[in-house]
Structure formats: structure tokens, C-alpha cells
Image (tube, grey):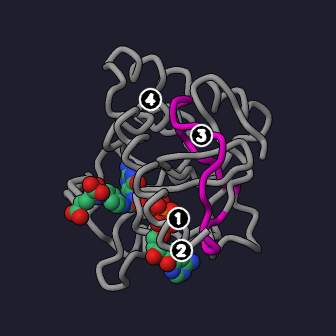
């Protein structure tokens, strides 16, 4: 397929799936985040992670507040992505506690006010949960289009960090049109299932 065809295809798919998740009702979102928390508890029943990077939901993404609260209760260190102030399309991961000062980033998403003393190298995270727009059963993912998570994931190839894509079931497609830089996921968690890719 021509590169430009694929670009158009990816753009259309992104629009379609973003529309699907934005259309989910508050009730569906509420039950989805409860199920997500329960899936997480089941998955880590026998080995509690030390640290986990999550995200604050935006644009209809699978909500994570209940999961974050659960981690806090379990003394699991929670980190959030922060848009890198100088390095374009790169993320930093900063610890998030109930007292962390928050600011809005340029996408309107709440993120910790940058404090380099509470950031972590992604390689040192036990678990990294990525948001995504579309996924398939092979673990291919497509995000919002900035390549932020692709760049982070490309640094994790030699690390023990467990990478888990989080999404609603309605974000699954038969096949994500992938690009050479797209990093496949080894696991995707939805409110109803865990897919080992
Ligand atoms: N919850 C959450 N946090 C995240 C991400 C994410 O996907 N979800 N990111 C994962 O990368 C990073 C932010 N990346 C983003 C990239 C594009 C847009 C977005 O809304 N784009 C608009 C155009 C906005 C603009 O250009 O100013 C759009 O496409 O409509 C949002 C976040 C870091 N934090
Ligand atoms: N590891 C990388 N190194 C350099 N550039 C990259 C890397 N990964 C992706 N990019 C660039 O980022 C841009 C956006 O990529 P893409 O559309 O795949 O993002 P995405 O998967 O939707 O976003 P995200 O990864 O933030 O969820 C592309 O132009 C691509 O060239």
C-alpha cells in the first residue's frame, strides 16, 4: 500500500474509533472503570507491582481513576505521563499522589507540574499502561497521532517493564494498519478481557 493511502486510512480509523469511545454513556464508562480495576486485581493477584504508569482519561478513553485509587491503597507508586518541555513528542513519567500539584498540558489533559526529582525512567517501571485509540488481536496499536508512546515503548525493548494497552472493547478492530515505528503490545486489557498477544 502507498504510504499516503495508509496515512489516510489511519486518519479515518482514528476518527471512527475516537467517535465510538466518545459516544459511550457515563454509565458505561463507570462500569468499565470498575471492571478495569477488577481485571487488574485478578492479573496481579500473586505479584503486586512496585510501580505503575497510568494516564488520566481524555476523549472517552477507558477511565482509570478507580484503578489509580486502588494502587494508592495498595502502596503501588503511580506515575503519569508529562509532555516533555523541550524534547518534541517525548514523554516523561512523574509520580502522582493525592497531593501532587497538577497543571493542564497543551492538549487540555491534566498532568503533574514538572518536578524532575519525582520522575522515573520508563525502564524502571514495573508496569506501563498505555492509552490507545485502536487495537487488534495481534497487539498492534494506534494512538492519538503524536508518536509519544511509540517513542517511549521503543526504549523498553530490553527492559522487564510489563506494557499493557488499556481500551474499551469497542476500540478493537480486525487489523490496525501499522507503520514501521509502531511498537506492538504484549498485552491488552479491556473491561471484559485480557488479550495476550
Ligand atoms: N489520557 C491521555 N494522556 C496522554 C496521551 C493520551 O493519548 N491519552 N498521550 C498520548 O500520546 C499524550 C498526549 N498526546 C495527545 C496527542 C493528541 C491529542 C489531541 O487531542 N489532539 C487533537 C489536536 C489537538 C491539538 O493539535 O492541539 C486532535 O487530534 O483532535 C491529545 C493528546 C500524553 N498524555
Ligand atoms: N520511535 C520513534 N522515533 C522517532 N519517531 C517516531 C517514533 N515512533 C513514532 N514516530 C513518529 O511519530 C509520528 C506519529 O506516529 P503515530 O501516528 O504512529 O502515533 P500514534 O501511535 O498514533 O501515537 P502514540 O504513540 O502517542 O499513541 C510519526 O510521524 C512517526 O514518524
| Mark before the other along the chain sequence, 3 or 1 | 1
What residue did someone put label 3 on? 173
Decide which of 93, 183 is in the foreground and name it: 183
Question: In the rendering, at what x and y percent does residue 187 appear?
Answer: 71, 46
Compared to 191, does 183 lie above or below? below
> Does residue 105 show up magenta in the picture?
no
Q: Is residue 105 visible?
A: yes
Marks 2 & 1, CB-CB < 8 Å contact: yes
Q: CA distance from mark 1 to mark 4?
A: 37 Å
Mark 3 or mark 2, which is nearer to you?
Answer: 2
Quadrant of the image containing the N terminus: bottom right
Residue at 47% across / 56% down in the picture?
143
What residue did someone put label 4 on? 66
Mark 2 or mark 4, which is nearer to you?
Answer: 2
Residue at 59% across / 32% down in the picture?
190
Q: Within the image, what quadrant is residue 19 found in? A: top left
Residue at 41% across / 34% down in the picture?
63
Question: In the rendering, at what x and y percent does residue 8 appear?
Answer: 43, 61
Decide which of 173, 52 is in the foreground and name it: 173
Marks 3 & 2, CB-CB < 8 Å contact: no
Which range of residues does the magenta coloring cover? 162-183
Which type of secondary structure does the marked residue at label 3 adopt? loop
Q: CA distance from mark 3 to mark 1?
A: 16 Å
Marks 2 & 4, CB-CB < 8 Å contact: no
Amino acid at each position: 500500500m502507498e504510504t499516503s493511502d495508509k496515512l489516510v486510512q489511519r486518519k479515518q480509523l482514528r476518527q471512527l474509533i475516537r467517535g465510538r469511545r466518545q459516544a459511550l454513556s457515563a454509565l458505561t464508562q463507570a462500569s468499565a472503570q470498575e471492571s478495569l480495576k477488577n481485571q487488574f486485581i485478578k492479573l496481579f493477584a500473586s505479584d503486586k507491582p512496585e510501580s505503575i504508569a497510568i494516564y488520566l482519561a481524555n476523549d472517552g478513553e477507558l477511565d482509570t481513576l478507580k484503578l489509580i485509587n486502588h494502587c494508592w491503597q495498595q502502596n503501588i507508586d503511580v506515575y503519569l505521563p508529562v509532555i516533555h518541555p523541550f524534547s518534541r513528542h517525548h514523554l516523561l513519567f512523574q509520580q502522582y499522589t493525592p497531593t501532587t500539584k497538577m497543571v493542564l498540558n497543551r492538549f487540555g489533559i491534566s498532568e503533574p507540574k514538572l518536578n524532575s526529582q519525582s520522575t522515573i525512567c520508563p525502564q524502571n517501571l514495573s508496569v506501563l499502561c498505555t492509552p490507545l485509540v485502536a487495537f487488534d488481536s495481534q497487539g498492534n496499536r494506534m494512538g492519538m497521532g503524536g508518536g509519544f508512546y511509540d517513542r517511549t515503548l521503543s526504549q523498553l525493548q530490553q527492559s522487564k517493564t510489563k506494557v499493557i494497552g488499556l481500551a474499551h472493547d469497542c476500540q478493537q478492530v480486525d487489523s490496525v494498519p501499522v507503520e514501521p515505528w509502531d511498537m506492538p503490545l504484549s498485552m491488552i486489557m479491556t473491561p471484559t478481557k485480557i488479550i495476550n498477544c
